[in-house]
Amino acid sequence: MRSSRRTVLSVLALALLVAVVAACAQATPTPTPTPVPQEMEGEMEKPAMMEEKGATLAILHFSVIEGTTWSGAHDRAAKRIVEKYPNVTYVYREEVGPDATVPYAEELIAEGANIVVGNAEFMGLPLKDIADQYPDVYFASVIASDLTTKRNFIRFFPRQYQALYLEGLIAGALTQTGNIGIVSAFPSVQVIRRQAGFFLGVMDAAELLNKDVKVYVKYVGDWYKPTEEREIAKTLVTQYNVDVLTQQTDSGSPLDVAQEEGIWFVGKDMDIVGYYGWSSTDTVAVSFDTRWEVLYEQMVKSWLARDKYPQTILYLGMANKMIMPDGTELPTVDIMNDNKVGVDAISPKARPLIPDEIIELVRQRREQMLAGVWDPFFAHEFVSNGTGLELEGLPIPEKGTLVKPANEMPSDEWLLSQFNFDLEGLIILE
């Protein structure tokens, strides 16, 4: 009797289970798989195979690495990627010009490179011409003003202007003569944008402290011309009474001049004291440090994940970061000096010379940008100086033209490719 009862109960339970499964099948339609474009089928390996194989990151440096802040920062970035990702290898070539970009790239691809980067636009753009020939390879180039992309041709740049704004606050507070000098490369959207960030910081400090401050810019004509950079730095000091000097070039010559003349220097691209050991905090008031690895990590992760359609415009700022194996968080850009960050990066010798309200403003604005809730290019209006770079179909706005009102954020496209005028008040020297 008990056996019959158990049998009946088992049959009923089974029938109930079948009914529930049938009902669920009717209620939940079978998902339709996303079709893969025919030309992409079989194009890249399966994710598991990619993870096992790893990746090779190849960087074509336009200059030498040693003794430069730009290529030096890219080289350090790649080494940090390798530190975090043991299945990633880094290879490179130095002093690569536009004519050598494609031959070097194809040589490195033949040796196993999966991600090939040109670290300057003028020599990185030729990579787009071979992108279709190597569909399994990511190609990438720094943005100067051209925004050309392809499915596997990525363009990237950090929002360095955010850290430059903080540097400007410090420089504006430090100057005693009221004269700040920039040894600069040549007019370009990239240079104009970075100088604008610095200038806005200087002007905010001057307004807060009720100071009259002038910022002078003199162009060298190229990124790396040590002799000419030195001559211009000397001119700014001796003829324009500059007592705070910075640069938008790549050699150490302006720093040498600042040290010789006993004036303050504001560094670019790297923590030049902490990483290179250049000079000391007796001369270097602060630097901004660029962590290209935050951008490279996006490319590496996409490639390892077999992403056929990676994000092709990467414009990352202080709110974006990479976490190193030891837990260190690296925002894309930050102020840094002698291995210290934030307000602690301000030179111990310079800090007593900076009023507390500026120190607090640096702290506040930095925290806001790290949180992604404030940006100097949103907060400030853009009024044209009448100088800059005339682009095809885009003349320089006349002096005094309000191009962008305050409390309005320009698009990434505009900032990266159309910001072609100096801000009103910058003094551009012939």
Image (cartoon, grey):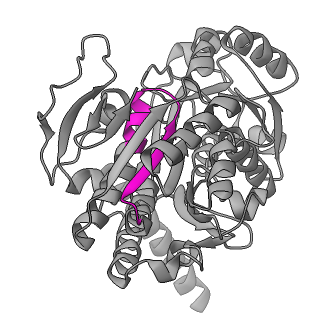
Q: Is residue 175 above or below residue 36?
A: below
Query: Residue 268: x, y in percent?
Result: 57, 50
In reply to whether residue 192 is colored magenta, the answer given is: yes
Residue sitting at 62 percent across and 56 percent down? 261
Residue 56 image point, x, y percent: 79, 35
Which one is nearer the viewer's eye here, 127 or 132? Answer: 127
- Residue nearer the viewer, 102 or 384: 384
The residue sitting at the right extreme is 111
Residue 347 lies in quadrant: bottom right
Q: Residue at x 74, y 67 (%)?
A: 325
Nearest the eye: 166 or 56: 166
**Nearer-the-camera pick, 58 or 181:** 181
Can you name the residue that lies furthest to the bottom here? 2
Would you place residue 238 above or below residue 367 in this image? above
Which residue is depicted at the point 35% across and 63% down?
372
The answer to whether residue 158 shows anywhere in this view is no
